[in-house]
Amino acid sequence: APGPAPAGLDSTGDPVMNLPWTHSGLPTLALPSGFNDAGLPLGLELNGRWYEDETLLAYGKEIEEIIG
């Protein structure tokens, strides 16, 4: 994302980073990946090929084990 999410629950922020994947129909996986200097959570988004959902989940599991 171009910056941290806005405070509050009214918005999740700018959708610029997820719109292409939403419209493409490709499998997408978001993993928690730590915190920034302000203590806000960071995420890592992975995208896979069509009909390769299980492969994407396997990669996600491996990455999650590495980054904790």
Image (cartoon, rainbow, N blue to C red):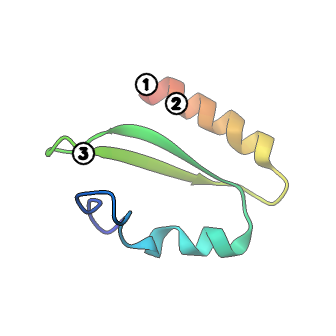
Query: Where is mark 3, residue-wise?
Result: 40
| Residue at the image position 64 percent from the left and 69 percent from the top | 22
Relative to 54, 14 lies left or right: left
- Within 10 Å of disc 3 (Cα), the crowding (few <14, some 14-19, many 20+) is few
| 3 or 1: tag closer to the N-terminus | 3
| 2 or 3: tag closer to the N-terminus | 3
In terms of secondary structure, where does tag 1 sit? loop
The extreme front residue here reads: 10
- How far apart marks 3 and 1 lie (CA) works out to 17 Å
- How far apart marks 2 and 3 lie (CA) works out to 18 Å
Residue 3 at x, y = what percent? 27, 65
Residue 17 at x, y = what percent? 47, 69
* Contact (Cβ within 8 Å) of mark 2 with mark 3: no
Q: Is residue 54 above or below residue 62?
A: below
Relative to 68, 40 lies left or right: left
Where is residue 62, by image quadrant? top right
Q: How many marks?
A: 3
Type of amino acid at the residue the image marks with label 1: Gly
Relative to 47, 55 lies left or right: right
In terms of secondary structure, where does tag 3 sit? loop
In terms of secondary structure, where does tag 2 sit? helix
Query: Where is mark 1, residue-wise?
Result: 68
Quarter of the image with the C terminus is top left
Which mark, by number, is residue 1? none
- Within 10 Å of disc 2 (Cα), the crowding (few <14, some 14-19, many 20+) is some
| Residue at the image position 76 percent from the left and 41 percent from the top | 55
Q: Is residue 40 above or below residue 17?
A: above
Relative to 53, 43 lies left or right: left
Residue 38 at x, y = what percent? 14, 46
